[in-house]
């Protein structure tokens, strides 16, 4: 069988994590079966169409590495197909036209075509799944209640609904429906929080096709972010953090791409700081140690300098503040080996000690 699956979001903007799970699950299924993955934009309901919503979805799919083989097909452009399907049901005697000229399915009165001639979601979805040759529908279990009616509509329009696989939804950590309030609820949010795409994709792949609803495991997502950053080449990490290659050693310990960018900024453009008088000793001792050493230090040499500084009573927090303008941040040895001797000494020299 030539497997054909579809991902069919409404164009409401960046994908919810649960919807992203559906997309990834469909893509994986298509890949495993050497099938085709198509994107359908379910925009029959104008109140759910957001400006730029489709663009956001395309961007999210690309970010997640979900490639599209066919589409996007837009339901708003396929009205003729739906009208034809409704006519078929009329002709077969399983639907009738109401006095307001809407078309309903006989037995249960489900509306197929509204009085204004536009298709309902139920009809559009079924007509598309048949016309696009979909073999498997993979979607969240919030659509389980639609299954029976869609099977009936499929028969009414002369077809058979493809096999349907419903998967569990992704809920918030508190077990409630995932929403903005939780944070980490949409791909846009996760991207903004600095989760690398590889981590989000790995998390969704791990969830696979959950039979039941699952609670978002943010700790796991954070762990995967650390793994994804560790797995990046220097070039990839520099690009992901929008930082120059020579600061990569400093970025290595970052737990997110946001943190990596912060680390880069601390090294590239530290804020000036005023230090208390006690810091004088640390800075003087540091200059004595750093001045005679080579222009560039390896990480090991940097660590040796820091060890010696501590041994002579230096305080690494003061040095960190002088070099990066912040009291926390990247590994200090990485900072020392990233910056040249001239730069390090200049930063110490311009630090004001009250
Ligand atoms: N447009 C529906 C949604 O966004 C998808 C329906 C389906 O997959 O059958 O949830």
Image (cartoon, grey):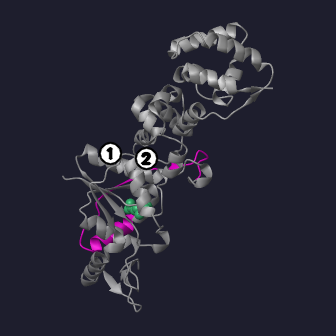
In the image, residue 310 above or below residue 335: above
Residue 199 picture location, percent across and down: 45, 38
In the image, residue 273 above or below residue 200: above
Q: Let me know if residue 234 is in the magenta part.
A: no
Which mark is first along the chain, 1 or 2? 1
Q: Quadrant of residue 156?
A: bottom left
Nearer to us in this view, 47 or 279: 279
Tell whether 343 sits left or right of 210. right
Nearest to the eye among marks 2 and 1: give it. Answer: 1
Nearer to us in this view, 1 or 337: 337
For ligand 1, which image quadrant applies? bottom left
Mark 2 to mark 1 CA distance (whole Å):
16 Å
User: Considering the numbered disc 2 on the image, is that residue within a helix, a strand or a loop?
Assistant: loop
The answer to whether residue 337 shows anywhere in this view is yes
Residue 230 picture location, percent across and down: 45, 28
Residue 104 picture location, percent across and down: 37, 81
Given the current orientation, which residue lies at the most extreme bottom position? 99
Point out the stretch of residues depicted in magenta: 147-176
Badge 1, how many Cα within 10 Å: few under 14, some, many 20+? some
In the image, residue 301 above or below residue 176: above
In the image, residue 108 above or below residue 64: below
The answer to whether residue 169 shows anywhere in this view is no
Tell whether 28 sits left or right of 194. left
> Does mark 2 have its CB less than 8 Å from ligand 1?
no
| Residue occupied by mark 1 | 28
| Residue occupied by mark 2 | 211
């Amino acid at each position: 069988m030539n497997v054909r699956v579809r991902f069919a979001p409404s164009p409401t903007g960046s994908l919810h994590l649960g919807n992203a799970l559906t997309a990834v699950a469909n893509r994986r299924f298509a890949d495993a079966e050497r099938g085709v993955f198509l994107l359908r934009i379910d925009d029959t309901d104008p109140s759910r169409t957001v400006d730029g919503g489709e663009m956001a979805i395309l961007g999210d799919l690309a970010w997640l590495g979900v490639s599209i083989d066919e589409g996007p097909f837009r339901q708003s452009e396929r009205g003729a197909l739906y009208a034809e399907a409704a006519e078929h049901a009329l002709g077969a005697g399983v639907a009738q036209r109401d006095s307001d000229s809407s078309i309903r399915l006989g037995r249960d009165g489900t509306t197929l075509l509204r009085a204004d001639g536009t298709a309902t979601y139920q009809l559009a979805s079924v007509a598309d799944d048949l016309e696009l040759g979909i073999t498997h529908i993979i979607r969240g279990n919030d659509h389980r209640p639609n299954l029976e009616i869609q099977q009936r509509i499929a028969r009414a329009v002369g077809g058979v609904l493809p096999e349907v696989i419903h998967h569990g939804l992704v809920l918030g950590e508190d077990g409630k429906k995932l929403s903005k309030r939780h944070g980490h609820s949409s791909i846009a949010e996760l991207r903004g929080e600095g989760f690398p795409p590889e981590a989000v994709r790995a998390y969704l792949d791990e969830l696979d096709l959950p039979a039941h609803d699952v609670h978002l495991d943010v700790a796991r997502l954070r762990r995967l972010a650390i793994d994804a950053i560790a797995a990046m080449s220097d070039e990839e990490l520099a690009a992901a953090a929008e930082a120059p290659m020579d600061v990569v050693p400093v970025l290595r310990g970052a737990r997110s791409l946001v943190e990596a960018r912060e680390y880069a900024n601390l090294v590239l453009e530290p804020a000036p700081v005023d230090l208390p008088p006690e810091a004088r000793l640390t800075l003087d001792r540091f200059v004595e140690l750093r001045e005679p050493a080579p222009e560039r230090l390896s990480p090991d040499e940097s660590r040796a300098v820091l060890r010696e500084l501590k041994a002579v009573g230096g305080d690494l927090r003061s040095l960190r503040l002088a070099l990066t303008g912040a009291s926390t941040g990247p590994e200090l040895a990485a900072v020392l080996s990233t910056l040249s001797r001239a730069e390090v000494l200049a930063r110490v020299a311009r630090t004001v000690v009250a």
